[in-house]
Amino acid sequence: MHAVILAGGKGTRLRPYTTCVPKPLVPIGDTYSILEIVLYQLRSHGFSSVTLAVGHMGHLIRAFVGDGSRYGLKVEYTDEETPLGTIGPVLNVLDDLPEQFLVMNGDVLTNLNYGAFLRGHIQSDRPVTVATYNREIKSEFGVLDLNEAGNQITGFREKPTVHFQVSMGVYAVSREALRGYTPGQVLGFDTLMLDLLAAGQCPGSDLFGGYWLDIGRPEDYDMANEQWQEMSAILLPQLTLDAAD
């Protein structure tokens, strides 16, 4: 099994932590970087090879990860000279990828079983499967429902809670779903989803109920470090057992 990890972003929302270090290499709990955690997880879930899509400070990621042998993986690289979006970097190496593969952001902490997720996608025969997570937003205001003209109140909800599913930044992709795009073009996840829907090729959703944290903001990073002592045994169970031995 093969995974493409998107590690080329500037991580501007996570500054000042990412001023001198690319976001995937930011340490969690003074033990492992985010990227290391992901690489160890992929290996334990049955993956043998990884493509790292690098850009901003990519030389640091190359120097740190190397060929991936210390993680039990074969790691290769593809460079983004300019930002290509979420899916764009994959197009440049599409011919080198297997028929079904994983694409994921390099700043995700989760105990999702990546191997089981990819195998489920293969069995579903979907063009793309998205790992999803339940989220809710609590409004601070009373919400009004209005008629079409907007001059009459037809309903009222006091500080409602809205429930919805969000993308976890982890996707299982069939190579054929990307065949119509040109290598080097900018392609975001949003465009791919809309194109598939317009073509009547509905992507699949795999709802996950475990631990998931998208480390996009300083408060997310602080939370990850606060939770690391408790979550390390869940995120990296084998390494925790080895350390105990």
Image: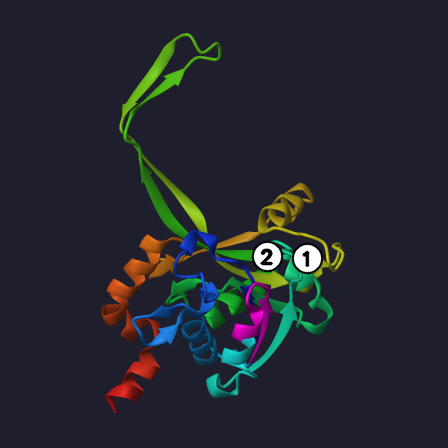
* In the rendered image, the vertical position of residue 69 relative to residue 226, given as above or below: below
Q: Which residue is mark 2?
A: 128
Question: In the image, is residue 9 part of the stretch drawn in magenta?
Answer: no
Q: Residues within 10 Å of mark 2 (few under 14, many from 20)?
A: many
Question: Percent position (x, y) of residue 8?
Answer: 56, 63
Question: Which residue ends up furthest to the bottom in the rendered image?
Answer: 245
Query: Which mark identifies residue 93?
Result: none
> In the drawing, does residue 22 fall left or right of residue 189?
left
User: Is label 2 in a helix, a strand or a loop?
Assistant: strand
Residue at figure coordinates x 52%, y 74% from the top left = 60
Q: How is the image coloured?
A: rainbow
Residue 165 or residue 10, whichever sits in front: 10
User: Is label 1 in a helix, a strand or a loop?
Assistant: helix
- Contact (Cβ within 8 Å) of mark 1 with mark 2: yes
Q: Residues within 10 Å of mark 1 (few under 14, many from 20)?
A: some
Q: Write the start and end of the magenta stretch as one range.
A: 49-61
Question: Percent position (x, y) of residue 86?
Answer: 59, 55
> In the drawing, does residue 27 fall left or right of residue 245?
right
Q: Which residue is mark 1?
A: 177
Which quarter of the figure has residue 80?
Answer: bottom right
Q: Name the amino acid type tagged 1.
A: Ala
Residue 150 or residue 83, whichever sits in front: 83
* In the rendered image, the vertical position of residue 159 relative to residue 206, given as above or below: above
Which quarter of the figure has residue 141?
Answer: top left
Label 1 – label 2 distance at C-alpha: 7 Å
Question: Percent position (x, y) of residue 140?
Answer: 27, 30
Residue at figure coordinates x 43%, y 75% from the top left = 36
Question: In the image, is residue 54 part of the stretch drawn in magenta?
Answer: yes
